[in-house]
Amino acid sequence: MPRVHTRRQWGAKPPRHRARVLDRAPDHIVVHHTATTNTKDYSKAQAYRLSRIVQRFHMRQLGWDDIGEQLTISRGGYVMEGRNRSLAAIRNGRHVVGAQTLGYNDSTIGIENEGNYSNAPVPVQLWASLVDTCVWLCYAYDLDPFQAIVGHRDFGSTECPGDVLYQRLPELRWVVARRLGVQGERVATPGHGDLHVPNQDSASRTVLRGVPDPPAQPDGMA
């Protein structure tokens, strides 16, 4: 489970409007990449700068109320709160409506990963935090990682999150499942809810049983 750096810590500007919070969980975790330069600056200062840049672009150029995604991970592995009210919503099993997956924002939570992964490898630090974050979200929302973890391109015409990162999503699902301590029977089941995700592999059609008690709340959670 990751330490999440708050909007106050990275210096977020106030949103134009408070985010809408739904009294239910999202059904999918959408993995994105920022398609920005693959910086070698893995510092916390760079992570905070990234969130400010993304928020500024989303609000000024795209005209959105706030940063679009709920969570952002830097190449150095720092995890940051994105859209306003996201951390409180996750803690309470609720869903902040973002602006990160057109047509599916009411039902998906987005993780924006710094960099361009069309050809470049994913940094070890970023990958470790992405695993931690997906474990946290799957536990918080009682999601099956084999069904829940998807890429942005599964929902529309986009190269996001890049071929390299997208090809690692089956690995991500399995690693998250192991981290959750999944044991026992896996049985076939139809797709999650009414949402059809055409590019998922066959491993995504499973139900997980035997998840143990949750780990303790991490130190430093904002």
Image: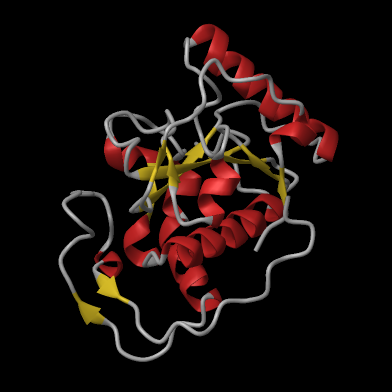
Against 10, residue 142 (above or below) is below
Q: Residue at x 70, y 28 (%)?
A: 50
| 18 and 5: which is toward the camera | 18
Left or right: 198 with respect to 169? left
- Please count the marks in the image: 0
Left or right: 106 with respect to 78? left
Q: Residue at x 67, y 20 (%)?
A: 53
Measured from the top left, where is residue 16 in percent x and y? 54, 15
Against 22, residue 16 (above or below) is above
In which quarter of the view is residue 39 placed?
Answer: top right
In which quarter of the view is residue 182 placed?
Answer: bottom left
Q: Residue at x 51, y 47 (%)?
A: 89
Against 30, residue 206 (above or below) is below
The structure's colour scheme is secondary structure
Seen from this angle, which residue lies furthest bottom?
A: 184
Measured from the top left, where is residue 32 in percent x and y? 48, 39
Q: Residue at x 63, y 40 (%)?
A: 81
Measured from the top left, where is residue 140 in percent x and y? 49, 63
Left or right: 74 with respect to 167? right
| 136 and 125: which is toward the camera | 136
Q: Quadrant of the N terminus?
A: bottom right
Measured from the top left, where is residue 41 in percent x and y? 81, 35
